Amino acid sequence: MNLHEIMNLDETYYMNTFGKRTPVAFTKGSGMYLYDTEGEAYCDFMAGIAVTALGHSHPDFVSALKKQIESVIHTSSLYYVENQAKLAQKIVENSAADRVFFANSGAEANEGAMKLAKIYHYKKGNPQKNEMITLTHSFHGRTLATVAATGQEKYQKPYRPLTPGFSHVPINDIEALRAAVNEHTAAIMLELIQGESGVHPADVDFVKEVRALCSKNDVLMIVDEIQTGMGRTGKLFAYEHYGIEPDIFTLAKALGNGVPIGALCAKQFAASAFSPGDHGTTFGGNPLATCAGLAVFDIFQKEKLVENAALIGSYFKEKLLGLQNETGRIKEVRGLGLMLGVELAEPKAKEVQKKLFDKHYLIGAVGDSILRLLPPLIVTENDIDLFITALKECLA
């Protein structure tokens, strides 16, 4: 089908939750590039919103999925699943977690984390500890509970009254957080880098204080690593940059490289609060999804992609800072590894995004002033150099 036909079908039959999308439809991908219905190539610096960490159609990933599809896709969790057990082991051996539960998305993983925090205190005989503190400008998902957890009015307004039990404090404001903690606080949940609202990292001192506050008050620390996890920041998990270990953390996005999967990961003392029947899923952790996760770990190791994210991320940031000094059109460059935000000096982010699209580069824009850059972890210095040249032309 051509683009016009696809757009007509979409506008006739699909619920209009995305508005007018960028006028392009992709039919195949390879490495850093996506190809549209006309065969035109676009260099992908958004990676499906931090999902396709391996780039597009990675041959080893494709081979692993083909082999699994020819074998078995789904059996349900009524039975043991080899890939599920192996992927849980892989995550535990490479993280602070002792136990893992698989869901289908980041929102589901976050729902699971909140349920685990509540039932943990309930089974300890403290049912009054049932409230959560999250950060303003955070994003935790689209379900009713994760919308309540999300600290952004625009996502909450149509769905009031919200799921009760959530309060929000500003990022990096430890005094506000201390004041918010009380005898009802079950958990503090935070992103270490707030991605959706413009790539805002939490300060190291703030995160260490959160960890200490949680430990002191029998409050569970939940880290939402949906976007920051799986190598995006130059370490396998973002909490490694902060010198702390969460009690619970969540994964999704890059864990499946495009195959839907989420993971709820916890230390044993917290995970043991779940007993048979307390939580469940039909599709979560099925043989295909967990095969994808295993392939991602395998390719990360073989190709040293986490190390590449750190190395090339540093190079990318350096080049962006150089562009800031050279052009005067960039106010700030933020982020870690290959999760970067470029705040412009003028409210022209959408305009720059459109100009880059015309040059066949795919990026994100947050609000009026922030460019959001999330290339696949396979990106090279040459890819960065070509992008910087294009961005410089657009800023001019």
Image: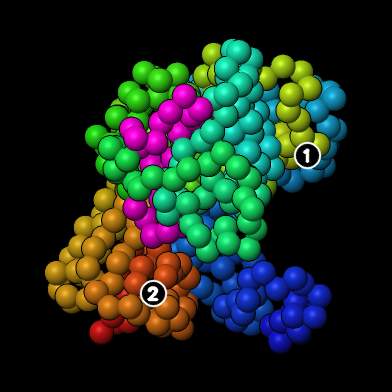
> Which picture quadrant has residue 110?
top right
Residue under the point 85% across and 25% down: 78
**Furthest residue in direction bottom, as rendered:** 4
Q: Give the range drawn in magenta.
A: 177-200
Q: Magenta segment: does it hold 70?
A: no
> Residue at coordinates 48% horizontally, 29% vertically from top-left?
185
Q: Where is residue 25 in the image (x, y as percent from the top left)?
A: 65, 75
Q: Quadrant of residue 89?
A: top right
Q: What residue type is labelled 2?
A: Asp
The quadrant in which the C terminus is found is bottom left
Spatial separation of the CA atoms under disc 1 and disc 2: 38 Å
Q: Where is residue 307 in the image (x, y as percent from the top left)?
A: 36, 40
Name the element at disc 2. loop
Q: Is mark 1 on a helix, strand or loop?
A: loop
Residue assigned mark 1: 283
Badge 2 density bin: few <14, some 14–19, many ≥20, Cα 10 Å:
some
Q: In this view, does 296 lie to the left or right of 278?
A: left
- Magenta stretch: residue 187 in it? yes
Q: Which mark is residue 103?
A: none
Residue 365 visible in this rendered orientation of the protein: yes
Look at discs 1 and 2 and give the one toward the viewer.
2
| Residue placed under numbered mark 2 in the picture | 368
Kindly identify the residue that appears in the image at 17 percent across and 75 percent down: 328
Classify 128 as above or below 143. Answer: above
Kindly identify the amino acid type of the residue bearing the numbered disc 1.
Answer: Phe
For the N terminus, which image quadrant?
A: bottom right
Q: Toward the viewer: 121 or 209?
A: 121
The local crowd at label 1, few if under 14, some if 14 to 19, many if 20 or more residues have their Cα within 10 Å, is some
Image quadrant in which you'd find residue 217: top left
Query: Which x, y percent locates residue 258?
Result: 62, 51
188 above or below 348? above
